[in-house]
């Protein structure tokens, strides 16, 4: 029996053989994907609803919060990318191997439930977005589900990644919608750079917490690490993956910024409050024109389809890794049957729920948000333990400075998430907290 | 035949019958086809011990590797055969691994290097007075028992009158062990060919029958080269 100690990864990502700047650019293009896709999917239906509501209720007042949350997101996702690059394994696998089956089981169960609830809400977003254009959900939802399923089954990892990167481009619709809303740019810039806050305004505090709380979700760590591992990104290519991660974190909040600008410049100005993203798209018509409203709705459908792809894939990755099943978008159905079976079930059951049940989506979202809130500090704690383990990370463990910043991020994100849950379920606590 | 989880976390008693720690892992030699349990990694709540001929001052919650010959089972309890301060500290040899840390929960690959599952538990059996590693459990029973849900399985077992089967891959089918990657490669493309079905009843009845009372662990491991290990890493 052979006994191997070596952990050197010899098979890496294929990169273009060019020189100089073009070589570096080529390398970045080859590596990019996991960070940008994860970041963009963060602006899913729930995220768009939160930002629309923030803009409609408080105008530009909360734009400066986006700057802060960008840093938190970038720090957490960089750790994820580093774990994936160094170990070549997904987070589900690392948790199982280092913390045992019992913990993994409960973590994955919570992830499955929260991602399932989120996937349902993504299909609800697709239905609401297409209904703005007069297309029945009985057409749009099955077509979207089949589209997602077909490309996942037929495509390899690179094809699917390219497709998702193309989807990322559609988020530009929100940037156009932001410009079409004709905001007063001096107000926008001032609100972004100069923090203003009113602690007595309970609604404003709650919205701030909600924005930060929705920025980092557990599926993001699982998805990004799994895709980084599947791409076989090598340590020497890591700086490009880091750039991809930072770019993804920036783009997420850049798009969020324009959603707030679009709704802040129109709905807030005219005293219209919204809680759902599709309502925001409809409400934009008289103030920013039908084109801006259509762009907003297109962005919504795009976000739903993209998250409808990524959330079930992220779940299938995590569970397969946890149980040691063959997984990966680069594999065929017969090579990874359980991985694809899980993915298929999640996609079609979510679509069927939207078509044939009268589920209270607000309750579903609340349930998913609660599970997210409980799961996130746990996941971040495991990540911190893993990334500081020299037997796993070698010399790539966190520096003291990185640990300090990460712990501050984890503590503040966890605290705010718990606070958000308390405020959601026990509104009376506002009096004591604030 | 028992699962490793049934041994882990069990309390360890001193020669004078005071609880002094718990079993946290078991060591085996990787190159053996049917590896014996060579040592017990014990977490002591408080202990004075000798390391390289020096008496170390009392230390709390310290984990020490104790040769299997210094641990025996009496009345279902793990007991040290020597006073703890006279226990020589041992180290894991280069080709020895820990069952809980290095085998359980690791990925199993087939000959094509495709992931086929994870090690849910390790099955241990007794032969010629030695505790030995029988195989790796890959079925649902191992998982369920790890979740602490043995009672519902037993009730279903009795209610349905049908015994649940656990899939076990014998250690003799293990071709490679990759310590750093946490991967175990088995000598087959189709895992079904290597899996052996052991019924829940069989595991339970054997567990009940032996309850690890009969084997005298003090006599089990006779060839532990303490000197060799002391110089090891």
Image (spheres, rainbow, N blue to C red):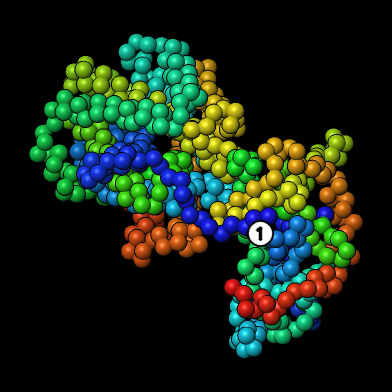
Please report the residue visible at 66 percent of the width from the left and 59 percent of the height from the top: B100
Residue B111 in view of the camera = yes
Residue B126 appears at what percent x and percent y?
84, 60
Tag 1 subunit: B
- Quadrant of image for the N terminus of chain A: bottom right
Tag 1 secondary structure: helix
Nearer the observer, B92 or A272: B92
Residue that extends furthest to the bottom in the rendered view of this protein? B54
Nearer the observer, A77 or A229: A229
What residue is disc 1 on? Answer: B100
Q: Quadrant of residue A254?
A: top left
Residue B73 appears at what percent x and percent y?
83, 70
Q: Is residue A350 left or right of residue B6?
A: left
Q: Is residue A99 above or below residue B188?
A: below
Q: Is residue B127 left or right of residue A261?
A: right
Residue A47 in view of the camera = no
Please report the residue visible at 34 percent of the width from the left and 25 percent of the height from the top: A302
Please report the residue visible at 70 percent of the width from the left and 60 percent of the height from the top: B31
Please report the residue visible at 58 percent of the width from the left and 44 percent of the height from the top: A322
Residue A236 appears at what percent x and percent y?
36, 52
Nearer the observer, A221 or A61: A221
Residue B56 appears at what percent x and percent y?
61, 86
Q: Count the numbered circles shown.
A: 1
Q: Is residue A416 above or below residue A140?
A: below
Q: Is residue A289 left or right of residue B146?
A: left
């Amino acid at each position: 029996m052979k006994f191997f100690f070596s952990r050197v990864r010899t098979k890496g990502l294929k990169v273009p053989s060019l020189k100089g700047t073009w070589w570096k650019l080529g390398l970045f293009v080859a590596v990019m994907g996991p960070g940008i896709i994860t970041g963009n999917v963060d602006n899913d239906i729930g995220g768009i609803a939160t930002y629309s509501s923030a803009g409609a209720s408080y105008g530009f007042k909360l734009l400066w919060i986006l700057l802060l949350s960008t840093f938190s997101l970038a720090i957490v996702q960089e750790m994820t990318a580093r774990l994936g690059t160094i170990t070549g394994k997904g987070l589900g696998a690392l948790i199982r191997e280092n913390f045992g089956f019992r913990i993994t089981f409960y973590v994955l169960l919570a992830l499955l439930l929260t991602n399932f609830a989120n996937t349902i809400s993504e299909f609800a977003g697709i239905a609401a977005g297409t209904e703005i254009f007069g297309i029945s959900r009985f057409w749009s939802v099955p077509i979207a589900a089949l589209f997602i399923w077909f490309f996942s089954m037929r495509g390899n990892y690179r094809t699917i990644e390219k497709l998702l990167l193309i989807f990322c481009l559609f988020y530009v619709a929100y940037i156009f919608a932001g410009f079409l809303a004709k905001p007063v740019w001096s107000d926008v810039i001032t609100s972004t750079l100069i923090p203003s806050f009113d602690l007595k305004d309970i609604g404003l505090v709650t919205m701030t917490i909600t924005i930060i709380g929705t920025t980092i979700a557990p599926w993001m760590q699982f998805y990004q690490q799994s895709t980084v591992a599947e791409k076989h990104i090598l340590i020497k290519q890591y700086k490009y993956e880091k750039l991809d991660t930072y770019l993804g974190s920036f783009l997420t909040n850049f798009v969020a910024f324009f959603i707030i600008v679009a709704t802040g410049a129109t709905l807030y100005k005219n005293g219209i409050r919204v809680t759902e993203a599709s309502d925001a798209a409809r409400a934009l018509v008289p103030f920013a024109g039908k084109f801006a409203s259509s762009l907003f709705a297109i962005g919504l459908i795009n976000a739903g389809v993209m998250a409808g792809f990524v959330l079930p894939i992220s779940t299938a990755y995590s569970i397969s890794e946890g149980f040691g099943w063959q997984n990966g978008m680069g594999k065929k159905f017969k090579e990874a049957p359980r991985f694809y079976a899980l993915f298929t079930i999640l996609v079609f059951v979510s679509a069927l729920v939207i078509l044939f049940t009268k589920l209270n989506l607000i309750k579903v979202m609340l349930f998913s948000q609660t599970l997210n809130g409980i799961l996130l500090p746990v996941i971040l704690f495991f990540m911190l333990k893993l990334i500081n383990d020299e037997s796993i990370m070698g010399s790539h463990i966190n520096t003291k400075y990185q640990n300090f910043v990460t712990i501050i991020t984890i503590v503040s994100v966890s605290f705010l998430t718990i606070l958000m849950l308390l405020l959601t379920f026990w509104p009376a606590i506002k009096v004591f907290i604030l | 035949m028992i699962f490793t989880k049934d041994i882990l976390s069990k309390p360890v008693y001193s020669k004078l019958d005071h609880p002094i720690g718990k079993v946290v892992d078991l060591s085996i030699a990787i190159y053996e086809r049917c590896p014996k349990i060579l040592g017990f990694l014990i977490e002591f709540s408080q202990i004075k011990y000798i390391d390289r001929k020096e008496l170390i001052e009392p230390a709390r919650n310290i984990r020490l590797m104790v040769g299997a010959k210094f641990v025996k089972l009496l009345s279902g309890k793990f007991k040290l055969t020597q006073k703890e301060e006279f226990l020589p500290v041992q180290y894991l040899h280069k080709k020895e691994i820990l069952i809980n840390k290095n085998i359980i929960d690791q990925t199993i690959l087939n000959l094509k290097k495709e992931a086929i599952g994870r090690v849910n538990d390790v099955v241990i059996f007794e032969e010629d007075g030695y505790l030995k590693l029988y195989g790796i459990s890959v079925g649902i029973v191992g998982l369920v028992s790890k979740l602490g849900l043995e009672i519902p399985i037993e009730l279903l077992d009795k209610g349905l009158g049908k015994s649940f089967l656990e899939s076990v891959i014998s250690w003799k089918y293990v071709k490679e062990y990759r310590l750093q990657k946490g991967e175990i490669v088995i000598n087959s493309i189709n895992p079904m060919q290597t899996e052996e079905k052991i019924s829940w009843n069989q595991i339970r009845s054997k567990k009940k029958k032996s309850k690890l009372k009969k084997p005298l662990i003090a006599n089990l491991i006779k060839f532990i080269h303490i000197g060799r290990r002391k110089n090891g890493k």
